Image (spheres, helix red, strand yellow):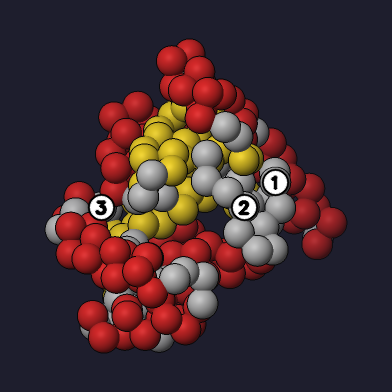
Amino acid sequence: MARKSGKNKAQRKKTIARRGLMLVLSSPSGAGKTTLSRMLLKADRKVELSISVTTRPKRRGEIDGRDYHFIDRVRFDAMVKAGDLLEWAEVFGHCYGTPRRPVYAALRAGRDVLFDIDWQGTQQLREKARDDLVSVFILPPSARELARRLHTRGLDEEDVIRRRMAKASGELSHWAEYDYVIINDALDHAFADVRAILTAERMKRVRQGGLTEFVRGLQAKL
């Protein structure tokens, strides 16, 4: 009986081929989107990270092709002109963008693509691929906690931290443009919320190709 059940499950997966989705996590620097992204990638093998191209220098511990594709401004501008980027933005003097081809290849293969991008990039994705997009905005529990996290992570100089705090107010004004909003006051709870959103979005009827044929097959045998 168990063997037959497993065979039926495999057949359903083959018949109902789910299209992947684009899952965007956005937040002001220090609110937790990068930590949540790493947790999700570790916990769910069906999710892969969209590797952006950037013109900024590598930080300590970063690896080209894993964290970013580090390129010069000339090549970046050429990719923009050729339409090879789904979205792009300039932040603190450096450019960031999402290559189009690997994202669409993953979606066609039924894999979900995770984006760690800001509100500008999210708007561009929404304009180009609204049906594939699921957007989540991560809020810090307080301004004081946001400042503490920026200092604790030790990635930026003091002047950069001040600039990030000043920029946070403008970033927060875009929270209502997102499908979901999570207040990251407890990391485990915020992560559970992200996974719940992903599970529900995967089950949406429009993302499950082959359902019509599957239901007709059921009806034919009743």
The amino acid sitting under disc 3 is Tyr
Q: Nearer the viewer, residue 59 or 49?
A: 59
Label drawn at residue 64: 1
Q: What residue does disc 2 label? A: 58
Q: Position of residue 194 (x, y in %)?
A: 43, 66
Query: Of callouts 3 and 1, which one flags the residue occurring earlier in the amino acid sequence?
Result: 1
Which residue is at 29% across, 29% downward? 127
Which residue is at 46% across, 57% downward? 198
Q: Position of residue 13 (x, y in %)?
A: 66, 42
Q: Residue 130 falls in which quadrant of the image?
A: top left
Q: Position of residue 18 (x, y in %)?
A: 56, 38
Q: Position of residue 12 (x, y in %)?
A: 65, 42
Which residue is at 18% across, 64% downward? 169
Q: What residue does disc 3 label? A: 178
Do the numbered discs 1 and 2 sit on residues whose CB atoms are within 8 Å?
yes
The amino acid sitting under disc 1 is Asp
Which residue is at 78% across, 48% downward? 7
